[in-house]
Image (cartoon, helix red, strand yellow):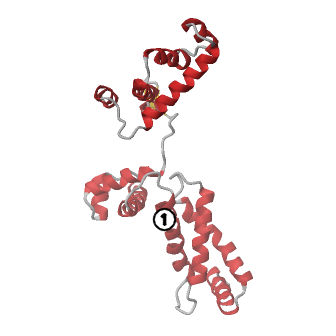
Amino acid sequence: MYTSERRDAVLLRRYHRSGDLAARDELVEHGLPLVRSLARRYAGKGEALDDLVQVGCLGLLKAIDRFDDDAGHRFVSYAVPTITGEIKRHFRDHSWTVHVPRSVQELDARVEEASARMSAETGRTPTVEQLSAELGEPSERIREAMRGGRAHTTLSLDGPTGDGHVAGDAVGEVEAGYRTAEDRLVVRAACRGLDARDRKIVGMRFVGDRLQREIAEEIGVSQMQVSRLLRRAVGRMRAEMDRPGHELPEADRQALTA
């Protein structure tokens, strides 16, 4: 009988000894059901099944290229750990949303495998203590691995967290008023070199957003003079800020850092 094992052996010899790429393609086609079966074990961890199948196919290609057909081993026995290893490597290197130590990732995989096996045997989900006894690992290490396993996926900031709130409600944001307060203190320090009239003009123009014509009417000068006074005042403010050793007054600095 021409079994699949015999077929694979013939195709592998054709590929490795004759460079027959068609034989390699046929091996990949025949191996796809195996890849899909192994990929399904890792579905539901934040990665699409189709993506896991693609990663598994990469493992299948590596198995085909590296298999020693003279060693006397079954190809499927070599391919399964190679494909599985490629999928696990993908999760380890690309799919964790937060950094989790490799030892925790590997233990998480062992915990999931043992949990699935024990659940199938007993019909009940094993406890942490049962998994600890099965794997020979301390209970706290089992809990750590299970917590780390949840790092495969993240919660949307729009996702509900109970009590009518969403996750985004717990995320802080920079208070815009802090920047405004800092700017005010910097401007206050820059105005130290201005006299009372220049300070008033600067305040009317840049704080009160008054037109130069309105300022001129209020202080009794021409609009052209207001323009010159503003340029001079702004120049003095820049010079004050650029002065070597310039720093905020002690009271302003304390207010800024309070």
Above or below 123: residue 237: above
Residue at point 56% right, 84% down? 67
Quarter residue 38 falls in = bottom right
Q: Position of residue 226 (x, y in %)?
A: 59, 17
Q: Position of residue 249 (x, y in %)?
A: 32, 29
Residue at point 46% right, 62% down? 92
Left or right relative to 209: residue 136: left
Pick whichever, 182 or 58, lies toward us.
182
Pick whichever, 120 or 199, lies toward us.
199
For the image, the number of numbered tags is 1
Pick whichever, 154 or 210, lies toward us.
210
Amino acid type, mark 1: Lys
Label 1: which secondary element: helix
Residue at point 43% right, 19% down? 195
Q: Position of residue 177 (x, y in %)?
A: 44, 25
Residue at point 63% right, 67% down? 33
Above or below 104: residue 165: above
Pick whichever, 30 or 52, lies toward us.
52
Q: How many neighbours does mark 1 have within 10 angstroms: few (below 14), some (14-19), or many (20 or more)?
A: many
Left or right relative to 201: residue 128: left
Q: Position of residue 187 (x, y in %)?
A: 44, 26
Instruction: State the quadrant of the C terminus.
Output: top left
Q: Is residue 80 in view from this perspective?
A: yes
Q: Is residue 1 in view from this perspective?
A: no
Instruction: State the quadrant of the N terminus.
Output: bottom right
Kindly identify which residue carries mark 1: 88
